[in-house]
Amino acid sequence: MTTLRVALLHLRIGVMNDLQYRVNFALQVLQSLLALATGLVVLALVYSHVAELNGWSQPELLAVLGTQILMGGVIRALIQPNMMRLTEDVHEGKLDHALTKPVDAQMLVSVREVQVWQAVDIVLGAIVIAVALVRLGGNLGALDALAFAIALTFGAVMLYCFWLLLATGSFWVVRMWFLPELFEGVFQTGRWPVGIYPDWLRFGITFLVPIAFAITVPAEALTSRLDWQTLLLAAGFAVALFAFTRWFWRFGLRRYSGASA
Amino acid sequence: MSTVPAPTQLVQEGRTRSLVDFYLTTMRTEVQLQFQYRAAIYMYLLGMVAEPVIYLVVWTTIAEQSGGTVGGLTTGELAAYYIVWTLVRNMNLVFTPYGWESRIREGKLSGQLLRPLHPIHYDIAEFAGGKFVWVLFYLPIAVVLTLVFHPTFDIRPLEVAVFAVAIWGAYLIRTFNQSSLGLITFWTTRVGALFQLYITLELLLSGRLVPLTLMPEWVQTVAWFLPFRWTFYFPIQTLVGDLSNEELLGGLAMQVFWIVVGIGVFSLVWRRAIRQYTAVGN
């Protein structure tokens, strides 16, 4: 219970802090709209040459795009800022501040930062998904909607684990400035259903970087092509990955030597 | 009759020689500096390679679905396009407007203004030196991409020569465009919004997203009147496309034109911008 209260408190402080800078909101809206416009142009371009891409129609790919934008918003608002702060703290020897607090350290390093305006993408992604659903006929079953929500949650957990694994790497490799670029580059693969990629790449963005689980699987739920085995696999993989991440975090932590800042 | 050159000519020669010396020294230093961050550069490169690989996979899928070609391009030609794309992209990474933003906002520019050379010389020389390391590191990735995606090349010696020049032309065009954008920070302190707009336009009109021939007719027409295509599409096409000698040399001429325009715009904005500059401390 304390854990949850601490997390919510940090969230509130972060939100209040960001709300001071209103112009950033306008900038973020502009940036998100430009990114969306680019995505739509690409879709239009693709479907001016073909009617179906690997079995996916244009509104179906719109649902994939919406899911990717939404998940990108979750990562950039809640996950990435915390993980980059973690790597900086390790670099500067300031992690002591978090480690000496009487709560679970992994939890604390995961909730200290929030970037509210990035949540624009969460809203925008949801709108894109809604438009896609209307264009698909507007009859999303309750079961599909539930599967979507579950798959999305597992996906977010897996991407959180992936980010924490990378950030834990900073106990060994101190300079990690390239992480956002690296992740952003690979994350763009989520714009397209994993089925179109060659086998080696599909394996990579399913099990090494769990983008397929985070984006394609929820989008499959939206377009009624998800079977329960896949959802079960996602659940199993999420739990296993979380356990491994927690072990790896503690393992890395043993290497940490602070500068008693 | 005296054979001693006029004093002004001597000064001019000395200046040129020291500028060349400055460039070579800075580039050499930067090469050594970049070599220290091997792992970080590789990670950055891997993130960068994701972009062309995605485009390539999507358009290869489309080509295969429509009987082997899309817009007249075979899968092998598409692969060649996006593999050369990555090399060109490496070359046209330049000092970003965000760099100018922090330089101006945080007052770091004050120190740079006291040096005997214009700050842009340092940017150009440092990034130019970095290219040698980056391209060297990219070569193994290019080999892997070639083995995986089977590109088809048909290259003449003149094309290689023009390519070697054109990538530096692309580098300079982009340097001056982005630096001019960065100077906007003198008035606005934030450049993010404008830069995003610029990047979006460039993405669509330069051949970065798709070979321009896959774009609608009118987009291709618009692209002719803008600098963007000379920083991506043209350098890539020198190796991948089937350009005539006139087209190859004409392209280089267009690059020179846009470099001159870029320098003109940059120095114009710089002269007005520097009057705006105030800094505290440093």
Image: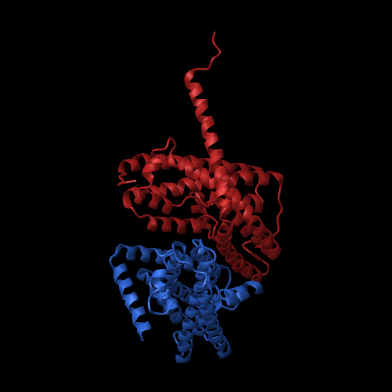
Near-viewer residue (A122 or A153): A153
Image quadrant occupied by the C terminus of chain A: bottom left
Image quadrant occupied by the N terminus of chain A: bottom left
Q: Is residue A145 left or right of residue B277?
A: right
Q: Colour of chain B?
A: red
Q: Colour of chain A?
A: blue
Query: Is A107 placed above or below B162 here?
Result: below
Asked if residue A165 can be seen in this view, the reply is: yes
From the top left corner, tell me how far across and down residue B214 is, in percent. Answer: 57, 61
Taking the spot 32% from the left edge, 44% from the top edge, the residue there is B277
From the top left corner, tell me how far across and down residue A149 is, in percent. Answer: 45, 85
Near-viewer residue (B66 or B27): B27
Query: Is B260 placed above or below A17 here?
Result: above
**Residue furthest top in the image:** B1
From the top left corner, tell me how far across and down residue A196 is, in percent. Answer: 61, 74
From the top left corner, tell me how far across and down residue A115 is, in percent. Answer: 37, 69
Q: Is residue B9 left or right of residue B164?
A: left
Residue B250: name its quadrant: top right
Query: Is A149 placed above or below B84 here?
Result: below
